Structures are given as C-alpha cells and as structure tokens.
Amino acid sequence: MNENQKKKIGILTSGGDCPGLNAVIRAVVKASKLKGWDVYGIPYGTDGFMQIAEGKYHPQDLILTHHGYNLPGVLKGLDVLQFLSGSVLGSLSKGHPENPEIAAKILQGYEMLGLNALIVVGGDGSVDIIYDLAQKGNWNIIAVPKTIDNDVPYTEWSVGFTTAVDIVTQALYDLTFTAASHERVMIVQVMGRDAGHLALHAGIAGGADAIFIPELTPALTPEIIDGCCHHLAELRAQGRKFALIVISEGVKNEDNQKEKYIGDYLEKLIVDKTRSLCVTDPVFCYLNSMDVRAMSLGHLQRSRPPLAMDRLLATAFGIKAVELIEKGKLDRVVIWRGGQVRSLPLKPVIKIIKKCHQENRCAYPVDPDGFIVKTARSLGIYLGENTTTETAVVPQAVEVLV
Ligand code: F6P
C-alpha cells in the first residue's frame, strides 16, 4: 500500500454512555489495522478536538493500537475491550454548538489531525450536533447509533439497547420476590428519555402487570390512575398478592409536566386513589394495607458489560463503518434492519431528527400499533392507554432513503 491509500480516521463516542461502545471502537481499530490505516481515538467527544487545538494532546498519542493488553500470565495479550462497558475514550453528554469560539476550536482540532473521515458513535442528539459541525468543517462522517433509549430513527436496534433491556428485566425478576414477600406493589422507574422502548420491552420480558410509556400514557391523568387501581384490584381478586409496575421516565405528571422521579409521583397517586376508593368500595381497601414502593433504576441501566447481541451489533456496525469509508460512501448512518446491517444517507435522517427536536417530540417512538404493544395488550398488561392522544410515529420507509 502506498502512503496515499493509507487513511487516517477518527472515532469518538458522544452522549450518554451505554454497553457496547468499546466493542464498536475495537471493531473499527481491528478492521482499520488490517487495512494499514491509523485510527485516532478522540477523547471526550468533540471536547477532544478542542483540547487538540489547545495543545493538550499530541495527535500521535491518540492513535489507537490493537495488540491486546498487558494482563499477567496466560491472559497476556487478551483483548478485553469488547467485554467492557463505558467508553475507553470517555464521552461528552452536553454539546455546546452555539458558541462560535468553541465551534472554531473544535474545527481547528479536527483540521490538525488531517482525518479522511470521522466515525461518530452517538445518539440522535449528539449526531445532530456533530452533523452541523461537519457541515461547517467539511468533515466526512459515518454515524453509528448507540443509546439505551433505542430512539434513533430507521434502526431497529441501537448499540446498548438490548443489554439495558436485560438489566431492567433482571431487576424486575429480583424485585418480584421482595414484592411477593411483603405483598407490595413495586413501581420501577426506567430510563428512555421521551421513548418507551426500554420500559415496554423489559416490562413484558420481566412480567410487569402495568407498563406506562409516554407514547401510550403521555401524562398520568386521574382516569389512568383510576384504571390502574381497578387493574390492581382485579389482580388481587384473581389471587395475586403483589404487583409490578414499570414506568418510563418520559411519562408526565397530572399537569403534563416532567418529574425527576415520576415513579414516586405515581406511588402517591395510587396510594391516594385507593384510599379514596376504599371509602365506597371495600374491594380497594386491601390496597391501603398493602405497601406501594417506588424505585428508580437510574444509571445502573447503562453500565453492565454488553450482552452478546450488543457485542455483535456493535462489532458489525464498526466493521460496516470502516467498509463505507473504504468505498468512499460517506455522510451515512449505519442501521440494523431486517436482520442486516445497512446504511442510509445521513442528511434526510438528520432532517427528521431536527424536525422532531424542534417539535419537542421523540424521533423514533414506540409504534402504538406495532407487535410489541399488541403483545403487551394481549397479555392483559395495563398500558394506561389514552386513546385521545396523538402519537408521533416517524415514517419508516427506508427504501426511500437507500
Ligand atoms: O439517553 C440516554 C439516557 O440514559 C436517558 O435514558 C436518560 O434520560 C439520560 O440519558 C440520562 O442522562 P444523564 O447521564 O446526563 O443523567
């Protein structure tokens, strides 16, 4: 290979971390090394470019190598990267694109590396921000979707999602036995930002009796709380002495406002409602004696080693990103669809993301008519559905974009 063919590519992770980021990095480095390319690992998202411009990093020190790690004895040379959660590069969850001075520094840092392309491992927010920078700096980018929220349009799976589903499912299993022992209603608040994918998938897999997601329960109205209490009473009548409720953090309170701890808020509503129902209907009185407890799983949902599916997805995405760069198919996003890794032009995908952000709605919400929701309905899970609410489903005609 002559020096002209040798490419210099950058990779950064941006937005909230999730399981599988290191597996993407590993795959990109391995595939690039085989081609004789250099991969520059940009620390802390776009902040890294700023620091390069300020001389805090020397470009040569950022080149990622793949030669295993310095483990002792028989483990010498073992490459553990794909097993580890978090990001070895660090990540940046707050962008600052509006500040022109900062933007100029970032562009300067990018320029100093002389990259042929940049792989951006990020969610819809970070990819949107970096896309704007890329336009200004004439960067070639490939986006790799990652997020436990699974809300990046057009990809059925984002890196990190399936592991997060497993974490929440396992938590529900663990909570089942303490709930049963004390005849309690356990409310589990789950992440997802404005999307209910994580709560819905894990709620079904974890045996939840009620699942509240923003797409079906935008806000906890009195009717929905009433319906939930009747559902709990019915379960009791059937012999169940405990219940599990999953609530996604994107569900709003009675006044249509976000709460930091919407699970705690729901706990109070259920306790108050059953207390008032008990006055006229003794069927609800048991709920007064029965404890209701809310908990938020918080960042535990992001930090377990990636499961096989996430390692596989991350690896396949990383390899595809390198392949696209080699073929000169730039400014694209890799996606998983119909059991295959594919890619789409980034521009129209960003257009959808921007529109949704402007309208303050999720770019890839749960489809209320999709098979996952139907599965939950058919199991008799209470979904607090407010049929009067308009849901925002993004068109999914991938063929148009390919
Ligand atoms: O987007 C991923 C996510 O984990 C969301 O589910 C959650 O709302 C948010 O990030 C939490 O962000 P932070 O790590 O800044 O608290």
Image (cartoon, rainbow, N blue to C red):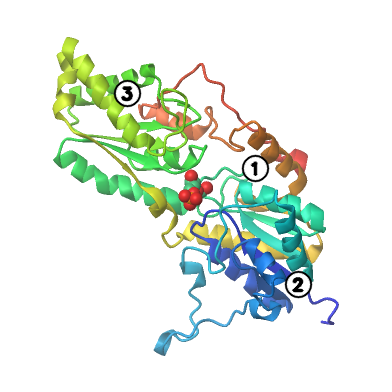
Q: Which residue is mark 1?
A: 154
Mark 1 vs 3, N-terminal side:
1
Q: Which residue is mark 2?
A: 113
Locate residue 53, reporting x and y percent. Answer: 72, 70
349 displayed left or right of 21: right
387 displayed left or right of 3: left
Q: Nearer the viewer, residue 104 or 79?
A: 104
At x 59%, y 33%, the residue is: 361
Farthest residue, direction top? 280
* 19 versus 242 height, above or below: below
Which residue type carries mark 3?
Answer: Cys
The reply to whether callout 3 and callout 2 are in contact (CB within 8 Å) is no
Which residue type carries mark 1?
Answer: Tyr
* 283 versus 6 height, above or below: above
Q: Residues within 10 Å of mark 1 (few under 14, many from 20)?
A: many
Which residue type carries mark 2?
Answer: Leu
To which quarter of the image does residue 107 belong? bottom right
Secondary structure at numbered mark 3? helix
Residue 169 disc label: none
Mark 1 vs 2, N-terminal side:
2
Circle nearer the viewer, 3 or 2: 2
Circle nearer the viewer, 1 or 2: 2
Mark 3 vs 2, N-terminal side:
2
Locate residue 94, reporting x and y percent. Answer: 58, 52
At x 74%, y 53%, the residue is: 100
The reply to whether callout 1 and callout 2 are in contact (CB within 8 Å) is no
- Compute the Cα span from label 1 to label 3: 33 Å
At x 51%, y 16%, the residue is: 388
Q: Which residue is mark 3?
A: 228
* 360 versus 39 height, above or below: above
